[in-house]
Image (cartoon, helix red, strand yellow):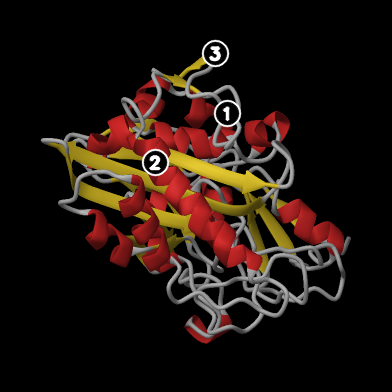
Amino acid sequence: MKSFHFIQPRTLDAAFAAWTPGAAWLGGGTNLVDLMKTGAVQPDRVIDLSRLPGLRGIDTLADGAMRIGALVSNADLARDTGFAGRYPMVAEALLSGASGQLRNAATVAGNIMQYPRDAFFRDLAWQQNEAPGGLPAILGTGGTHAAVHPSDFCVPLVALDAVVELQGPSGPREMALADLLLLPGEGDGARTALRPGELILALRLPAGTEAFAGHSRYLKVRDRTSFAFAQSSAAACLRIEGGRIAQARLALGAVAPKPWRVAEAEVILAGQAPHPDLFRRAAEAALAGAQAPDGAAWRIDLARRTTARALALAMAAAGTPAQMPALPASPFAPQAGDIAHA
């Protein structure tokens, strides 16, 4: 690992004053340390944010929105009953990621900022957004090789129109999470729309999105039930009125260099009576533009099946189970488990 300066500011102003080009922000370190060990990222200085005040809250705002501080751990957010009761799909996604030890350390901002990675991630010749093998993107790249974004957490967040609050040397601003993460070729080759020295302070779920809690699921298909990135995933949420789908939200994971919201499928679902054939049509629309590199056509079919299954799970019986499944987000999970989320 390349030598670097390690700085621990105690205020936001001190953190911004410490930042210089080539520096890296450190939250839980579960992503950055991997990158530094392989040499994929070689910062001149590492600025530890763990001592900054005011970045660990989970709060319901006056307008009904929910605000989560950047340094809240994945484990703490998933286990927060006030949050998990309103957003069980997001809690399920969090609990399906990594291991318990990593979830205890990893922060929500760090989860958002994960680098795309594939089977060549630990190769010192690795270049960001490239996927010479492993798990190539099938959407958003025009058929060129690119690695998928690895986050589970971000997929339901994009479905729910999450907003990120940012601050940097030029002051505060906010944007949709869907706009923060960029595709290859956007933003002069950058992975995100962050400006130099800018930092995520919090993310926010808009008021009203808790209305999907009764019929929302995150489904993740992977090589093994735990400790593995998704081969495909889907976050599906439905609002049911009078036996019909009044509103639908759908986002796919492990298919593109960013979580992939599929508005076309949402339009097909809206106003219709729930039915397996409807879910299959929506899944077909969601993957209509997919292009797979040679030998990876199976990934398109897997993503279609995952999407249809996630919609069916969201609608099944009472929709979201009263208890978090014992194997969160797994297709092998029973509909209820022993880990209460509300």
Provide residue 264's location: percent of width, then percent of height: 30, 67
Which of the two residues, 252 or 65, is positioned nearer the viewer here?
252
Q: Are marks 2 and 1 in contact (CB under 8 Å)?
A: no
Quadrant of image for the N terminus: bottom right
Mark toward the viewer: 2 or 3: 2
Q: Residues within 10 Å of mark 3 (few under 14, many from 20)?
A: few
Provide residue 245's location: percent of width, then percent of height: 20, 45
Q: What is the distance, in whole Å, between disc 2 and disc 1 at their CAs?
A: 14 Å
Q: Give the label on residue 338, or none.
A: 3
Q: Residue furthest left?
A: 242
The residue to which callout 2 is attached is 312
The residue to which callout 1 is attached is 333
Which of the two residues, 164 or 135, is positioned nearer the viewer here?
135
Q: Residue flagged by tag 3: what amino acid is it?
A: Asp
Does residue 183 lie above or below 89 as drawn? below
Q: Going from the N terminus, do you reach mark 2 or mark 1 first?
A: 2
**Taking 197 as reference, is 313 left or right?**
left
Q: Residues within 10 Å of mark 2 (few under 14, many from 20)?
A: many
Can residue 205 be spotted in the picture?
A: yes
- Label 3 residue SS: loop
Which residue sits at x=25%, y=46%?
206
**Taking 323 as reference, is 4 left or right?**
right
Which residue sits at x=58%, y=22%?
326
Provide residue 20's location: percent of width, then percent of height: 62, 69
Q: What is the distance, in whole Å, between disc 2 and disc 3 at their CAs?
A: 22 Å
